[in-house]
Image (cartoon, rainbow, N blue to C red):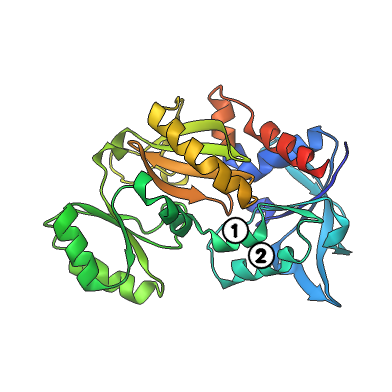
Amino acid sequence: MSLKIAVQMDPIERIAIQGDSTFALLLEAQRRRHAIFYYTPDRLALADNKVIAAVAPLTVRDEVGNHFTLGEARRTDLSEFDVILLRQDPPFDLAYITTTHLLERIHPKTLVVNDPRSVRNAPEKMYVMEFIDLMPPTLITRDLAEIKAFRAKHGDIVMKPLYGRGGEAVFRLAQEDLNFGSLFDLFSVTFREAWVVQKFLPAVKHGDKRIILVDGEFAGAVNRVPAPDDLRSNMVRGGTPAETDLTPREREICARLAAPLRERGLIFVGIDVIDGFLTEINVTSPTGIRAIKNLGGPDVAAKIWDAIEQKRR
């Protein structure tokens, strides 16, 4: 089948294609001879009760520095497309939320991946709290007394912004760390929302596993090992990708998530697991599929398009 597909993403000229999951999806869509088009979220509009955007035909090539060609952008009713890929990166802010409200007007007649309502209602570090028994001890707050009590109970902790991305502003605080007060003050003036406070898991030095689920089913995994001098394992922060298999505990986590993800229309999801503990459920713009394939794992992009094509049938 041939589909007409538009991708809503950040400026394509800025992406690093070697590790970009959106680019992998576009390459696979083009290989399947789907017609692909491109626009950035700032070109969205709601006019005469139609969701429109300045959309340009797109051709992609797996060549660094020469990875795309755009045709002439035209004002287009997005309901004319079969599929919209919602692939802009966080921050998950009001601008992002606004795009989900707009795209919700055309979904599911036009299939938006992932479902914009679920993207809005299931932010990474909040939705995961529905599965608290699978997680390390976790607190969401900006209240100093609550954080002090949590720290007294669990010892070493990690603090990070609730709507952070890519390992930004993730801090480990040892039980006797004298920087706690200063870090609390810094977070207080930097972030208006609550923060995530979790018990520190020492096994993170062996890796933070990114597991990809496609329509609720396991599709591939990569272990991201942090640099010796860094807490964060995100590959954009210097984490090293490594081949991996799932443990029985990780398979149990995947099985628990399968039905809820399908019910929410979350087709492409990346979950993070450290030492058998679920820490995040990434639904906005999950990554990792190129690293999985480069390490000899499955072609996750192909699995995603198989699922999308099945739903369009």
Real-space CA distance between mark 1 and mark 2, rounded to the nearest whole angstrom? 7 Å
**Which quadrant: the N terminus?**
top right
**In-image side of 268 versus 205 (left or right):** right
Three-letter amino acid code at disc 2? Thr
Query: Badge 2: how crowded within 10 Å, few (<14), some, or many (20+)?
Result: many
Location of residue 191 (image quadrant): bottom left
Q: Secondary structure at mark 1?
A: helix
How many marks on residues? 2
Residue at the image position 44 percent from the left and 38 percent from the top: 253
**In-image side of 156 versus 99 (left or right):** left
Three-letter amino acid code at disc 1? Val
Residue 43, percent across and down? 75, 67
Query: Badge 1: how crowded within 10 Å, few (<14), some, or many (20+)?
Result: many
Residue extending farthest to the left is: 176
Q: Secondary structure at mark 2?
A: helix
User: Looking at this view, is 165 or 64 the one in front?
Assistant: 165
User: Looking at this view, is 246 or 61 the one in front?
Assistant: 246
Residue carrying label 2: 100
Location of residue 65 (image quadrant): top right
Q: Are marks 1 and 2 in contact (CB under 8 Å)?
A: yes
Residue at the image position 83 percent from the left and 56 percent from the top: 56
Location of residue 178 (image quadrant): bottom left
Residue 24, percent across and down? 67, 38
Residue carrying label 1: 119
Residue 66 visible: no
